[in-house]
């Protein structure tokens, strides 16, 4: 029986057969607790803490299922009471009673050590079940109430995390837990709604709680009793940066005790940052985007497992791009001196790009270079593109603008505001081979935002990349701008420019073998439900929602489908 009514826990499958014949108790028979029948409500183990929620399994409890409709929780429901006989017969507040199951809350003043539990009904008193209570026994609730697998983990809107609604890096997520013990801030009363919902009241907190997600230490922003409920704990955690999508492990530690292993939550890595091509010819520039020695585009990568040998630890102009790219002078770049534009190869700021980014009613998008976006992240799957530009005279600049999009993919979006993102801009001088000067890394020899003082900002331009397919939504082009703390003068000459997003401190040595491409991931998702159903339920008094979702067979690192992506 799975009961998602107010405050109820489903009966674990372990007890389903044993209790199947006990839906209606025999009147006049004294209640009986199964051997080992008092268990932690989160994982059905015999671990307990003061104030924790318990499930008790047995026979001849209540004539029919009942649950309370308001606070405070009753200590007698359907003629059933739960007694802690070792604590002067103290009665436990009740969340649910039925013929074979009771959900109750232990009092906060239950001493650490052995405690004796009995059930009392009009027909008599049950046998005694002896349990062992510890100061803290942190447990994460799970979606199928088995104590393992997908945890009851939500976002701050109380929507359950699933593959279709995953946690993203830097999100605040809520782990719903049991038996963290008495709050260190004091004042909890079993059966009463925990404070914090009404003005002038503060939630009751538990100190010393730590958490890991995917093995990475994750900041705990709140740990304590969930306001408005009774006995239900929540631990709010900031999701770490992780390059993985799927079900990842989560654990909580308190007082040297760690929550159960094999609890997971749905996670989604940050999407890919991609740079945009320019769009108009620049006076004096003869290079274009076609692959080869006269290319105005070059790339360099440091992850041979992902990208292969071409461009590995060395700039290459063998980009693999075809004749369609003869129209592009390189990456879209605008240089400003104050409010004056002193270099522009795109027309985005002046609305002079023409149809370069617009292919409405045109031919194949793959033949339109203006609909290309070039993956560029120096420390994610480390690869960046650079674009050639030429200055006919010495030019003073106060700010630099590059342009990017977020792949336009709702499954794996790039979030410009994600706090784990560090933007980077670099300018190199040219070499004899018309390639960026090789500095041995991703840092420019003429200018780098890593060491040149300034500030990044981003905003959306008025220009979008428009597909020939009417059904495709336009992809807005975003502006990444670096405003220098002091003006910089570039002598006349030939240069290379790059901008990218760095999202971890050091590049990975190689990509994981457990990897799929974005296109493969999209195919997995397309096999899921077309119109998922949403279920609303109350979890120990806390309203939540759960939406049917597609499933992912494992946790994967998702790679770009190609070095360049097209609309």
Image (cartoon, rainbow, N blue to C red):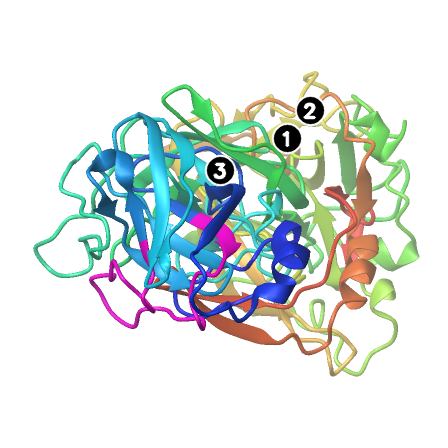
Q: How many marks?
A: 3
Q: Quadrant of residue 247?
A: top right
Residue 520 marker: none
Residue at 21% in and 32% down: 184
Q: Which residue is mark 1?
A: 379
Q: Earlier in the sequence, mark 2 or mark 3?
A: 3
Q: Secondary structure at mark 2?
A: loop
Residue 420 marker: 3
Q: Which residues are magenta?
A: 55-81
Tell me whether circle 1 and circle 2 mark residues in contact (CB < 8 Å).
yes
From the viewer's perspective, tell me whether residue 402 is left or right of residue 136.
right
Depth check, mark 3 against mark 1: the one in front is: 3
Residue at 47% in and 61% down: 60
Structural distance between the alpha carbons of marks 1 and 2: 7 Å
Structural distance between the alpha carbons of marks 2 and 3: 16 Å
Q: Secondary structure at mark 1?
A: loop
Question: 308 or 361, which is in the foreground?
Answer: 308
User: Up-down: is 361 above or below 430?
Assistant: below
Tell me whether circle 2 and circle 3 mark residues in contact (CB < 8 Å).
no
Q: Earlier in the sequence, mark 1 or mark 2?
A: 1
Question: 17 or 406, which is in the foreground?
Answer: 17
Q: Secondary structure at mark 3?
A: loop
């Amino acid at each position: 029986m799975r009961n998602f009514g107010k405050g109820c826990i489903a009966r674990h499958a372990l007890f389903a057969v044993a209790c199947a014949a006990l839906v209606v108790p025999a009147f006049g028979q004294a209640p009986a607790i199964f051997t080992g029948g008092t268990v932690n409500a989160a994982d059905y183990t015999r671990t307990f803490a003061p104030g924790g929620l318990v499930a008790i399994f047995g026979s001849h409890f209540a004539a029919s299922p009942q649950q309370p409709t308001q606070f405070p929780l009753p200590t007698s429901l359907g003629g059933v009471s739960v007694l802690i006989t070792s604590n002067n017969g103290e009665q436990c507040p009740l969340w649910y009673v039925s013929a074979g199951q009771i959900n109750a809350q232990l009092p906060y003043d239950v001493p650490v050590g052995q405690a004796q539990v009995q059930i009392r009904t009009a027909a008599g008193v049950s046998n005694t079940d002896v349990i062992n209570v510890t100061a803290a026994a942190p447990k994460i609730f799970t979606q199928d109430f088995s104590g393992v697998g997908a945890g009851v983990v939500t976002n701050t809107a109380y929507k359950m995390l699933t593959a279709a609604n995953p946690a993203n890096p830097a999100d605040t997520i809520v782990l719903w837990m049991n038996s963290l013990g008495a709050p260190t801030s004091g004042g909890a009363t079993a059966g009463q709604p925990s404070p914090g919902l009404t003005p002038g009241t503060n939630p009751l907190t538990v100190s010393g709680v730590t958490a890991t997600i995917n093995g990475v230490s994750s900041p705990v922003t709140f740990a304590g009793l969930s306001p408005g409920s009774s006995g239900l704990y929540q631990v709010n955690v900031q999701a770490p940066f992780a390059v993985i999508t799927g079900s990842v492990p989560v654990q909580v530690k308190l007082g040297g005790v760690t929550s159960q292993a094999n609890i997971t939550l749905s996670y989604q890595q940050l999407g890919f940052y991609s740079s945009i091509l320019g769009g108009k010819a620049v006076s004096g520039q003869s290079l274009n985007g076609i692959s080869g020695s006269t290319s105005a585009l070059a790339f360099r990568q440091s992850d041979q497992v992902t990208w292969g040998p071409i461009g590995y630890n060395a700039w290459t102009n063998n980009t693999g791009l075809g004749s369609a790219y003869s129209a592009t002078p390189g990456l879209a770049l605008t240089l400003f001196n104050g409010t004056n534009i002193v270099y522009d190869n795109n027309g985005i700021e002046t609305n002079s790009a023409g149809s370069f980014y617009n292919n409405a009613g045109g031919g194949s998008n793959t033949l339109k270079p203006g609909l290309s976006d070039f993956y560029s992240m120096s420390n994610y799957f480390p690869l960046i593109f650079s674009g050639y530009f030429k200055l006919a005279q010495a030019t003073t600049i106060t700010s630099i603008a590059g342009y990017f999009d977020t792949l336009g993919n709702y499954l794996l979006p790039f979030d410009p505001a994600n706090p784990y993102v560090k933007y980077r801009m670099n300018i190199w001088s040219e070499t004899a081979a018309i390639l960026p000067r090789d500095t041995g890394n991703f840092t420019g020899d003429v200018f780098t935002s890593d060491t040149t003082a300034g500030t990044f900002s981003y905003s959306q331009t008025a220009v979008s990349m428009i597909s020939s397919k009417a059904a495709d939504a336009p992809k807005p082009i975003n502006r990444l701008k670096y405003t220098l703390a002091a003006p910089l003068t570039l002598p006349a000459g030939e240069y290379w420019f790059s901008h990218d997003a760095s999202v971890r401190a050091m590049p990975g040595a190689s990509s994981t073998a457990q990897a799929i491409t974005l296109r493969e991931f999209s195919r997995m998702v397309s096999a899921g439900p077309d119109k998922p159903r949403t279920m609303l339920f109350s979890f120990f008094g806390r309203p939540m929602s759960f939406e049917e979702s597609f499933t992912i067979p494992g946790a994967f690192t998702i790679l770009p489908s190609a070095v360049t992506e097209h609309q």
